Image: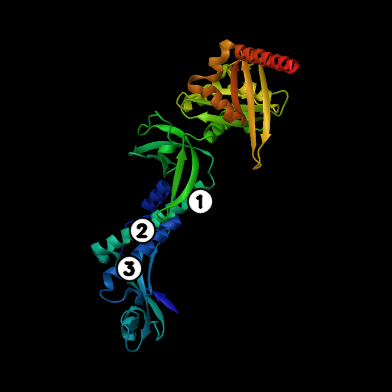
């Protein structure tokens, strides 16, 4: 039967420190307590094992009283008549002096004054505890953020280097890489903004959270946060095309005939879409009605330009892939608007609809039609002469 001796000297209560640290790091208190106990064991072995093989000192244990915060380090030794193994045995007479009820073969716990561990032991304990705290934090990050991939997270800018922005999100440090940064956007230290949690990967054996401000999914998720009808499923986002920091096009439709999808996304006096644009640093957002008819959808996607006619052609290639082509006729005065600055409007519309779009002026189309008619007459005249 094991009997325990302990140092009765009162110890400084560490429970308050443990509770504070657990709260700051988001770690369970019991995990921290066990980490400290393991650190104390490592400290004891380092301080008192000397040149001996530390693996031979097996019966060392540590304990922090969960109510008082008192700390104990002790080793379990066997009561013997003649000591052959000083690390794991104690003489019967010495043990008897501690407790009259001790008998040969009993195992007793010999308490060690924690203060005797010394500077090196304290350093070892600190190292072990720090490692355990890091391990617990890594597990928390892996468990928590693996379930948040593709979701919005609000973070605070910590610092930056030549390539990455480092962000604090719920007591975890995340990385916004260069490819996830909006060109021209300023990331000031301590400023708060929203990010998309893109992935959680292993980096040097530890989880690394990667964020994005450029993903089209960030636009989708911001609309879900801002528009109740999207969150409830009444309004559906069918497609999004985006050039981060400049402009996005969002195609929506309503599953309820009584709900105006575009109006719900714009919000009263444009408040909802304006709030999203502000969150994206002033990025312009065009909200268009999705339509199952490709021609009508393409007409919508090219807004704010007005369209006269859309001719679509779907071609299946030999390799099985499909090529979608659309010829769009617009009024001459709308041609520049339809193309957009540097071709942005037509480029975004093409991505949104999945069609390669060729825009022609109404006058050019008329000239082409006239020329085709003249060509036909020419062919007829040549045939009659022959």
> Dots 2 and 1: beta carbons under 8 Å?
no
Closest to the observer: 74 or 339? 339
Q: Which residue is mark 3?
A: 7
Screen quadrant of the C terminus = top right
Of the two numbered discs 1 and 3 in the rendering, the one whose residue sits closer to the viewer:
1
Where residue 197 sits in the image (x, y, percent)? 49, 41
Q: Is residue 169 left or right of residue 296?
A: left
Q: Is residue 62 above or below residue 231?
A: below
Q: Residues within 10 Å of mark 3 (few under 14, many from 20)?
A: some
The circle drawn on residue 129 is: 2
The circle drawn on residue 143 is: 1
C-alpha gap between disc 1 and disc 3:
40 Å
> At numbered mark 1, what does the secondary structure look like: helix, strand or loop?
helix
Residue 270 is drawn in which quadrant? top right
Q: Residue furthest bottom?
A: 81
Q: Earlier in the sequence, mark 1 or mark 3?
A: 3
Screen quadrant of the N terminus = bottom left
Q: Is residue 268 left or right of residue 74?
A: right
C-alpha gap between disc 2 and disc 1:
21 Å
Of the two numbered discs 2 and 3 in the rendering, the one whose residue sits closer to the viewer:
2
Where residue 134 sits in the image (x, y, percent)? 39, 54
């Amino acid at each position: 039967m094991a009997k325990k001796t302990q140092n009765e000297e009162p110890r400084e209560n560490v429970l308050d420190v443990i509770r504070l640290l657990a709260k700051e790091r988001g770690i369970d208190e019991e995990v921290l307590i066990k980490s400290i106990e393991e650190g104390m064991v490592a400290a004891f072995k380092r301080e008192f094992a000397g040149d001996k093989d530390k693996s031979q000192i097996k019966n060392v244990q540590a304990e922090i009283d969960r109510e008082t915060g008192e700390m104990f380090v002790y080793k379990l030794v066997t009561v013997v008549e003649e000591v052959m193994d000083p690390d794991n045995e104690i003489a019967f007479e010495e043990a008897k002096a501690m407790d009259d009820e001790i008998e040969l073969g009993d195992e007793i716990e010999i308490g060690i004054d924690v203060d005797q561990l010394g500077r090196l032991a304290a350093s070892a304990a600190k190292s072990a505890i720090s490692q355990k705290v890091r391990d617990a934090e890594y597990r928390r990050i892996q468990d928590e953020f693996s379930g948040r991939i593709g979701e919005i997270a609000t973070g605070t800018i910590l610092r930056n280097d030549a390539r990455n922005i480092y962000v604090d999100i719920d007591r975890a440090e995340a990385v916004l890489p260069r490819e996830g940064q909006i060109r021209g956007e300023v990331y000031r230290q301590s400023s708060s903004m929203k990010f998309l949690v893109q992935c959680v990967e292993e980096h040097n054996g530890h989880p690394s959270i990667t964020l994005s401000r450029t993903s089209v999914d960030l636009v989708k998720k911001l609309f879900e946060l801002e528009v109740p009808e999207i969150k409830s499923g009444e309004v559906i986002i069918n497609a999004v095309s985006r050039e981060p920091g400049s402009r996005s096009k969002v195609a929506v439709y309503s599953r309820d005939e009584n709900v105006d999808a575009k109006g719900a996304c714009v919000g009263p006096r444009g408040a909802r879409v304006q709030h999203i644009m502000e969150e994206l640093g002033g990025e312009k957002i065009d909200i268009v009605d999705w339509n199952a008819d490709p021609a009508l959808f393409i007409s919508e996607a090219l807004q704010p330009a007005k369209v006269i006619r859309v001719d679509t052609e779907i071609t299946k290639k030999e390799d099985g892939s499909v090529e979608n082509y659309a010829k769009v006729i617009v009024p001459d005065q709308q041609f520049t608007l339809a193309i957009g600055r540097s071709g942005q409007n037509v480029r975004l519309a093409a991505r949104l609809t999945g069609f390669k779009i060729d825009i022609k002026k109404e006058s050019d189309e008329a000239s082409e039609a006239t020329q085709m008619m003249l060509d036909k007459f020419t062919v007829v005249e040549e045939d009659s002469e022959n």
